[in-house]
Image: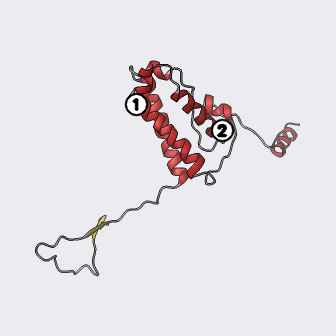
Amino acid sequence: MDRWQQVGDDDSRAPPEQGEEPRFIWLADCAPPTCYSRVLGLSKEIIGLLGKLHNYHRTKTCVEILPKMFLDVQNSCINTKLRDFLYVMENLPTQYCRERPRIVLLKQKVSNLYRIINRICYRDLVYFTDDCEAIETGQSTPHYREDRLQMLVEEKR
């Protein structure tokens, strides 16, 4: 199906009069962004930008002092990690680092993500874990609830 469709009552509509512009609408097959999709997309942008900053020769020395961060939007520790990360970014040691355009962009993106999570999507996001170490190391350790842990112990016997 052609994505452009002329607006009208039927397909046999006469061509537009001279000087009249045809009216078209764009048909799209997408859903509006949800809080989760926006947070997920922004966190991927931040991780990508951080990778570029670590490899770019003009910003490499500036981002060496930033704490390591592996964003997981389903981890409840993301709020404190983003807050701490913003604090470090606002207090970079040199003016040169604070004024680099890519670092300013990173700071804006992290600030936007923090604001979206804590204000706009406050009750919409669901956290499945509270493993703060996973955000710092990128390695998630399984945490079992007591009943699941008891079942595992009983299976080993």
Reading the image, the residue beneath label 1 is 102
The secondary element bearing badge 2 is classed as loop
- Which three-letter amino acid code belongs to the residue tagged 1? Arg
Q: How is the image coloured?
A: secondary structure
Residue 90: percent from left, percent from top:
51, 29
Q: Is residue 59 above or below residue 130?
A: above
Residue 8: percent from left, percent from top:
27, 78
Disc number at residue 77?
2
Image quadrant assignment for residue 24: bottom left
Q: Earlier in the sequence, mark 1 or mark 2?
A: 2
Q: Which of these two is toward me, 98 or 62?
A: 98
Residue 47: percent from left, percent from top:
49, 34
- Which three-letter amino acid code belongs to the residue tagged 2? Cys
The secondary element bearing badge 1 is classed as helix
Label pair 1/2, CB-CB below 8 angstroms: no
Q: Is residue 82 above or below residue 15?
A: above
Residue 86: percent from left, percent from top:
55, 33
Separation of marks 1 and 2 at Cα, in angstroms: 26 Å
